[in-house]
Amino acid sequence: MSIQSFKTLSLILTTLIVLGCNDSSTTTTPVAPPPIPESGSGVGGGVPMATPEPEIVETIPAAEEKPPASVEAKPAPTEGVTAGDWAMWGGTPSRNMVNATTGINLDFDAEEGTNVLWTAALGSQTYGNPIVAGGKVYVGTNNGGEYREKHKGDRGCLLCFNEADGKFLWQLTREKLPQGRVNDWPEQGICSTPSIEDGRLYVATNRCELMCIDVEGFRDGENNGPYKDETDTEELDADIIWSLDMIEELGVFPHNLATSSPVIHGDLIMLVTSNGVDEAHLEVPSPRAPCFIAVNKNTGELVWEDNSPALDSKAPAPFDNILHGQWGSPALGEVNGQMLAFMPGGDGVLYTYDVATGELVWWFDLNPKESTWELGGRGTRNAIISTPVFADNSVLLSVGQDPEHGEGVGHLYRIDATKKGDISPQVADGDGYKDNDNSGQIWHVGGVDTDGSITGEENGLLYRRTISTVAVADGYVYAPDLSGFLHCVDFKTGEKKWVYDTFAAVWGSPMVVDGRVLLGDEDGEMVILKAGDKLEQIETKTFNSSIYSTPTIANGTMFVSDRSRLYAIKVK
């Protein structure tokens, strides 16, 4: 992807993930990508919109140059495994983007409606991933859909739909923080992907609250507690069970937005708080506030916390602090009978804790020691926005920066999760560094091709910054970077097998299912590749607008959220 492409991306993005919004469309017509407004413009500047109803495939107009799709079109009969609910980011606490469904049929057309069961309007910008559990689908977005008449303008929203027909059920609505874009960037909505367990939903809001919500909302006529002070208590509103305000109660200063997706183990729910730097990007206003927390899922009470990236960073000076924001999410994995939480730090270090006690077990610096951080992305040191993936007693993780910072050198590591202490590739040695005898590095992909012998270009980048999460399946790792390159790497050796260029920025993550790799991009296309060590493109699907999320497959249906619409696509 060219630098010019990133200049185009920068017009759309300002600091974290800033995109404007225009008037909402009705749900019976696909929502066209809105024009880019001035930063901070409001939502819904046109005629107020009635509560949307789910779109039926018959109402989707076909492109003029193509014949109308038959609404009776059905996939050919398929056999195999039909995986059930996808109830959290990554499907399981290991966060590996692999779905067990087999015998799928991807003969669909999102534009014409072929094998599209239903679609529903979202907000004007959507970064949350669809989650499916208990017959319901949940997506974080902004208030561009205006499903609730009493809420106008910019809000953070979590929408709940009926899985079978797309009927709107309820909405969690959170007003914007008064501090403005430094803590709650305009129009971004709720970007956290929720976790669902036993009729309860856990999510981080745009206001930096960790919330527990009754999945029935107020449709059941009950106000479940102990939280009873909801402003919104009508049938189409969310029923909050408890709320932990991380700003008021923990002193967190979220930079631009709180975005982490929670993970659950036993009675604990774990989260990265998004504590970050000030508006000038020079200081961390709340260095004593926690970066990582574990909370009792039943009560919302804090069980343990850690602020290592700010007060006890394992990164080398002078970069031993939070560099920008902390927008990653935790993953879990059991090693030798011990359940570990893998927490990506804003200093570019992966911290690993004993889930039960909060004790730091090991840490790994994902940046070369000679790398440097410079404002605006000009340096070579990176933070971590991707989610760790646990597989075969190891962790796979990449580095990245705010997408507005554009292209830059990146690194992908496979890390031995069985070790203890400092397992970074290098450790301090006087005024310099030496190789670490206790290093947990199994392999590394990335850096610069100085002489051009690999890339054909002097100082070519072997791997670039990313905000995506990898998928590991059948001995191969599928790792996208922000520049739009999807890398296939041998899981055991780190040998690169192939690279596919989407020719568009990639924010989402790959989904591996039934021998295929699915990946959406900013151009609104989803490429379908054959999984394995040989590059083979099967097909490219086109959606109505940019895809900043990851496809979700549950109960024989694939759910895809583009920038402003949710699609339910029959694949079984």
Image (cartoon, rainbow, N blue to C red):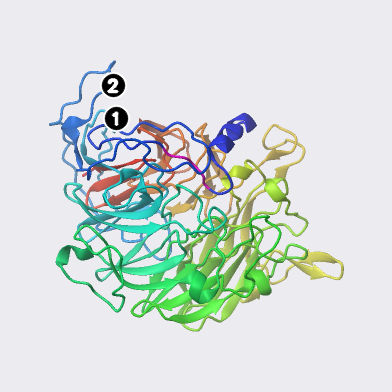
Instruction: Characterize the local packing of mark 1: few (<14), some (14-19) or many (20 or more) Cα atoms within 10 angstroms.
Output: some
Q: Residue at x 19, y 60 (%)?
A: 235
The location of residue 345, given as percent across then percent down, is 59, 64
Instruction: Characterize the local packing of mark 2: few (<14), some (14-19) or many (20 or more) Cα atoms within 10 angstroms.
Output: few
Q: Is residue 463 visible?
A: no
Image side of residue 442 versus residue 180, left or right: right
Q: Residue at x 70, y 54 (%)?
A: 381
The location of residue 182, given as percent across then percent down, is 57, 55
When the figure is inspected, residue 554 is found, relative to residue 536, above or below; the finding is below
- Which residue is the extreme one toward the top? 65
The location of residue 118, given as percent across then percent down, is 21, 41
When the figure is inspected, residue 219 is found, relative to residue 74, above or below; the finding is below
The location of residue 564, given as percent across then percent down, is 35, 40
Inspect the image, locate mark 2, and give the three-letter code of the amino acid beneath it.
Ala
Image side of residue 263 versus residue 506, left or right: left
Q: Could you say which disc has been placed on residue 63 in the image?
A: 2
Inspect the image, locate mark 1, and give the three-letter code of the amino acid beneath it.
Glu
Q: Quadrant of the N terminus?
A: top right
Marks 2 and 1 in Cβ contact (< 8 Å): yes
Q: How far is disc 2 from disc 1 in space, using C-alphas?
A: 7 Å
- The magenta segment: 17-21
Image side of residue 68 versus residue 446, left or right: left
Q: Magenta includes 445?
A: no
The number of numbered discs placed on residues in the rendered structure image is: 2
Residue situated in front as seen by the camera: 377 or 94: 377
Q: What SS does tag 2 mark?
A: loop
Q: Could you say which disc has been placed on residue 111 in the image?
A: 1
Image side of residue 290 versus residue 564, left or right: right
Q: Is residue 35 visible?
A: yes
